[in-house]
Image: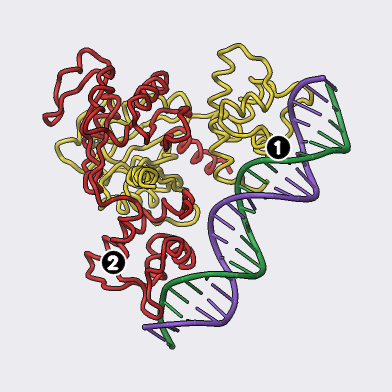
Chain colours: A yellow, B red, C purple, D green
Amino acid sequence: MDRASASTVARLSAYYRLLGEFERERAETIPSKRLAARAGVTPAQVRKDLSFFGNFGRRGLGYNVLQLREEIAAILGLGRRWRVALLGAGNLGQALFAYRELEKHGFFIEHVFDIDPKKIGTRWRGLEIAHTSELPRRAADPGIDIAIVAVPAEAAQGVADIAVGAGIRALLNFAPGKIVVPDHVAVREVDLSIAMESLSYALVK
Amino acid sequence: MDRASASTVARLSAYYRLLGEFERERAETIPSKRLAARAGVTPAQVRKDLSFFGNFGRRGLGYNVLQLREEIAAILGLGRRWRVALLGAGNLGQALFAYRELEKHGFFIEHVFDIDPKKIGTRWRGLEIAHTSELPRRAADPGIDIAIVAVPAEAAQGVADIAVGAGIRALLNFAPGKIVVPDHVAVREVDLSIAMESLSYALVK
DNA sequence: AGATGTGAAAGTTTTCACAGCC
DNA sequence: GGCTGTGAAAACTTTCACATCT
């Protein structure tokens, strides 16, 4: 199958969370109209997004909440445990480490790296902070699936290179500015300045 | 003038930062080709984005680095000081408060609100943490331009309502899930789970 | 009747390609 | 010759509208 667009995948992820809510509300089936209303999109959008991956609904009835949630989990790869490394143990790193929400989705921070001698050897919830140079060795087995780049801008490309060199194929980058990686590596950027500046643009109209 | 698309504005913000780099590298003028290469887009994209707002370049030469940077600052509203309120003094709030980078772009956190009695009255860098119920009074004058929502998901809509009620017209939301606001309020979502799940999708192909 | 799945239409964004200026 | 600015073309995304199934 061809790849779905980035926006389809982002919405799928939102549907997944909303289906969890509907599940807790004891809904058995749900029409695209209700899911769309809560997601803030059109019903046609919901149906198009889903139909890209298969025929999950029943005409006249809608979608089975549990079953659709499982289908989306399978599509997004949420059935399993993802091994995550946190690169950078500063303020942001600490906040991300404390944000346990990600574990509910299967993302577990199993490594924390930094270069500050004062931090190395200290433990967060029992997990020892290691020097970034240790990354290749520690990534050897059982491997690291995703690296979160939470270092200052100047250091971002460097740690990304180390991560890619160690075989990591997915990066979430919080440092401002693009990092350059080979084609087979996926990168998502979370750029605070861009978000804030798009708000100031909205305010100056 | 009509509004530029969200993606044009996001790229403009990236160009702005890159022009700062070129400025430090003592470049006087720059062709769209070089700016595009560093931004990771096509030269035509750069020219189209800029031409939406005016004719800033000179044929045969390119763009004047300093001048273009100022033009973009004016477009994005970066010439002034933006008053920011941080809603939520948890781990994420703390990390955002410590992230001084935003000040370089003119965004200053002047208020921090929370509802935890243990936190209220304590100070961060001299700034007192106030109860969220204080927000309307404190937003009265000189006003708050932008609120950053850094509270747990369940509380997000509630604090957003308070912020909107207090006249704030721009929100940056870190809580998962959409928050509903009136049309005249701008919202940008930063959703970690969506970012991570789009990475796991990329990995399972 | 109710709601999906989907081609076709509409809308939006990006890229092409070249006239026009430096 | 180098490079911008921009209509036109191409590519992509969203919405419409309806045949189809329960």
* SS for dot 2: helix
Whole-percent x and y of residue A119? 18, 35
Q: Residue B139: percent from the left, percent from the top?
A: 26, 28
For marks 1 and 2, give the one nearer the viewer: 2
- Disc 1 is placed on an element classified as helix
Numbered tag placed on residue B14 in the rendering: none
Rendered view: A105 above or below C16: above
The residue carrying pointer 2 sits among few (fewer than 14), some (14 to 19) or many (20 or more) residues within 10 Å by Cα, namely some
* Nearer to the camera, A110 or B16: B16
Q: Quadrant of residue B47?
A: bottom left
Quarter of image, res B27? bottom left
Residue at x-position 36% and y-position 40%: A148
Front-lying residue, B106 or A129: B106
Q: Chain of mark 1?
A: A
A198 lies above or below A12: below
* Dot 1 and dot 2 residues touching (CB under 8 Å): no
What residue is pinned by disc 2? B67
Q: Amino acid at mark 1?
A: Ser
Comparing A34 with A23, the one in front is A34
Gap in angstroms between the C-alphas marked 1 and 2 = 49 Å
Q: Is residue A11 left or right of residue B43?
A: right
Chain hosting mark 2: B
Placement of B45 over or under A205, stated as above or below = below
On the rendered structure, is A15 left or right of B160? right
- The type of residue carrying mark 2 is Gln
Which residue is identified by label 1? A51
